Image: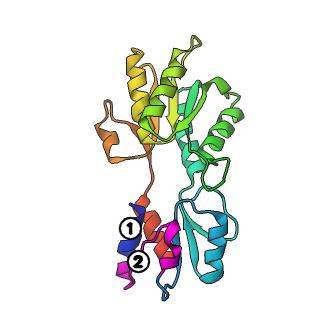
Amino acid sequence: SIRLAMEQKAEEYGYRAQVVSQNSLDKINPDTIGILVLGRLDESMLHTLKEQYENVIVIDNTFGLQGFDYVGSDLAAATTGALQYLYDLGHRRIAHLGGSVVPILGKKEFYDSRDVAYATFMRSRDLYDEALVYSCAFTTKTAYHKMTEMLAKETKHPTAIFVSNDSMAIGAYRAIAEKGLRIPEDISVVGFNDQPNAKYMMPPLTTVRIDTKYIGYSAVDLL
């Protein structure tokens, strides 16, 4: 959706957006005025692009690159807002089901500011419990298994859980239902991204909305 928004905005300015993958950078049109990098790209490739083009903008990249213009979401602030919402409802035992990815382009660790924001928020209120923190791939299936694992422990289950994306929340929903628990009576769930199918879940998923269209528009405006 970010890419489609960028293409639409570029057309409004009278430009054509050429889409290339990281494996076909040699096919970039020679009259290109700038590069919009969507997602994660190896830093050496980014610096090579910056040497060749005056205007390089990185979009939706969570690696915290220095020296590049950047457009994205403040995931940490959004996470803090979601946790504050749960806290204000009276929740104190709040779990976190975070996302992880396999190593990309030689990187051994994946940095997600949502994980850091969760730990910071909970520790600031002396509520952090490592037993309530789980990480898995950003998929429904792996989230289901991790949530099942969390709820299978004999210790007191969380009263709320913050999940890093809505696809993972679907898996969490099933695990909670299979445990015989109710949402939100027994455990509240907050997702992230506000995917279109979130409102059709039962009950409808409370989730953080990221305005992907605005991210795409802003990137082209900046370029």
Determine whether 183 is above or below 198 in the image. Answer: above
In this image, 163 relative to 46: left or right?
left
Residue depicted at 51% across the width and 30% down the height? 161
Residue 23 covered by magenta stretch: yes
Disc 1 to disc 2, how far (Cα)?
11 Å
Residue depicted at 60% across the width and 55% down the height? 62
Residue depicted at 56% across the width and 14% down the height? 153
Q: Position of residue 91 (x, y in %)?
A: 54, 26
Q: Position of residue 32 (x, y in %)?
A: 49, 84
**Which of the two residues, 127 or 196, is positioned nearer the viewer here?**
196
Q: Position of residue 13 (x, y in %)?
A: 39, 83
Q: Which residues are magenta?
A: 11-28
Q: How many marks?
A: 2
In this image, 131 relative to 89: left or right?
right
Circle 2: residue type: Ala
Image mark for residue 21:
none
Looking at the image, which residue sits at the far left?
200
Is there any visible trace of residue 115 in the rendered image? yes
Mark 2 crowd level (few <14, some 14–19, many ≥20, 10 Å Cα): some
Helix, strand or loop at mark 1: helix
Residue identifier under label 1: 5
Circle 1: residue type: Ala
Helix, strand or loop at mark 2: loop
Residue depicted at 47% across the width and 64% down the height? 215
Q: Position of residue 223 (x, y in %)?
A: 52, 78
Foreground: disc 1 or disc 2: 2
**Which of the two residues, 34 or 107, is positioned nearer the viewer here?**
107
Residue identifier under label 2: 17
Mark 1 crowd level (few <14, some 14–19, many ≥20, 10 Å Cα): some
Residue 103 covered by magenta stretch: no
> How is the rendered protein coloured?
rainbow
Q: Which quadrant of the figure contains the N terminus?
A: bottom left
